Image (tube, grey):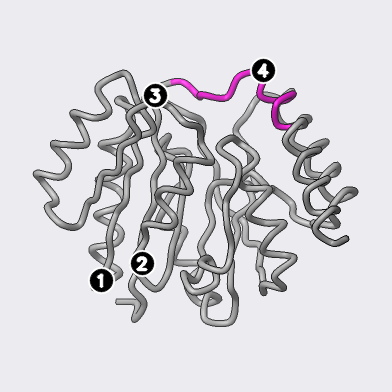
Amino acid sequence: MYPNSISFVIPAYNEQDNIKRSVDSAFDFLNNNFSDFEIIVVDDGSVDNTESICKDLISRYKDKVVILRHLKNRGYGAALRTGLFSAKKDLVFYTDADNQFDIRELRGFMPYISEHDLLIGYRKNRQDRLIRKLCAFGYNRLIFLLFGLDVRDIDCSFKLFKRASLNLLSIDTDAFLVDTELLIKSKLSNFKIKQLPVTHFPRRAGKSSIKFYHIFTTLRDVVFLYKKLKLSKG
């Protein structure tokens, strides 16, 4: 058993085909490795059966599972903000509900967390279409040029924070810029950060909520963030 307590945050939007497996896997792993943990599912206004499945999970796992629900869809960043800043344990980890990561790989992160504020995964064998990989590569380079953020896989949703460090940050975006915002603010706060490889699996059920137009809205949000941070420096 690890000596730390941990909050495991899972944002979910219309993930009726994935959420039970996601929570079951999280519980099995945490129950076998941590004596004190909580699983926080943020249902971001789902319109499928995600909510009812989450209620069944609460009945099964009692106080180990917390369900936080937005009455309407507010966005990925808003869901993460709700989950991350509701966490009560020493460590805060988040991943998506789509089961594209093996949470058991969190074991490889634990030896480093005592010396770091933030551990971030990068997908060593990304299971996405070529166009999405190319967009991700271009986006990572853009963020490096604008902000000096040298991270291999900004949007990899496999990140582990010390809660004391996380609480020094804020999340302003409601959208998909959230990973970028968190990492840039972590860099500006001089966090000690380590990158580690993680396995990425194809999505087997449900549909991604990412659409083509999100490329343009995210680029717009990058410009807003750049202007905001530039102005804050005076």
| Number of other residues with Cα within 10 Å of mark 1, as a class: few under 14, some 14 to 19, many 20 or more | some
Q: Which residue is mark 4?
A: 212
Span of residues in magenta: 207-218
Q: Which residue is mark 1?
A: 36
Look at the numbered discs 3 and 1 and tell me whether their residues touch, using CB distance below 8 Å. no
Closer to the chain start, of discs 1 and 2, is 2
Look at the numbered discs 1 and 2 and tell me whether their residues touch, using CB distance below 8 Å. yes
The residue under the point 67% across, 56% down is 183
Residue type, mark 3 in image: Ala
Looking at the figure, which quarter contains the C terminus? Answer: bottom right
Mark 2 and mark 3: Cα distance apart in space? 27 Å
The residue under the point 46% across, 47% down is 95
Residue type, mark 2 in image: Ile
Closer to the chain start, of discs 2 and 3, is 2
Q: Secondary structure at mark 3?
A: loop
* Side of 31 relative to 181 (left or right): left
Mark 3 and mark 1: Cα distance apart in space? 30 Å
The residue under the point 50% across, 32% down is 75
Closer to the chain start, of discs 4 and 3, is 3
Which label belongs to residue 6?
Answer: 2
Look at the numbered discs 2 and 4 and tell me whether their residues touch, using CB distance below 8 Å. no
Closer to the chain start, of discs 2 and 4, is 2
The x and y percentages for residue 59 are: 9, 44
Above or below, 192 against 37 in this view is below
Residue type, mark 1 in image: Asp
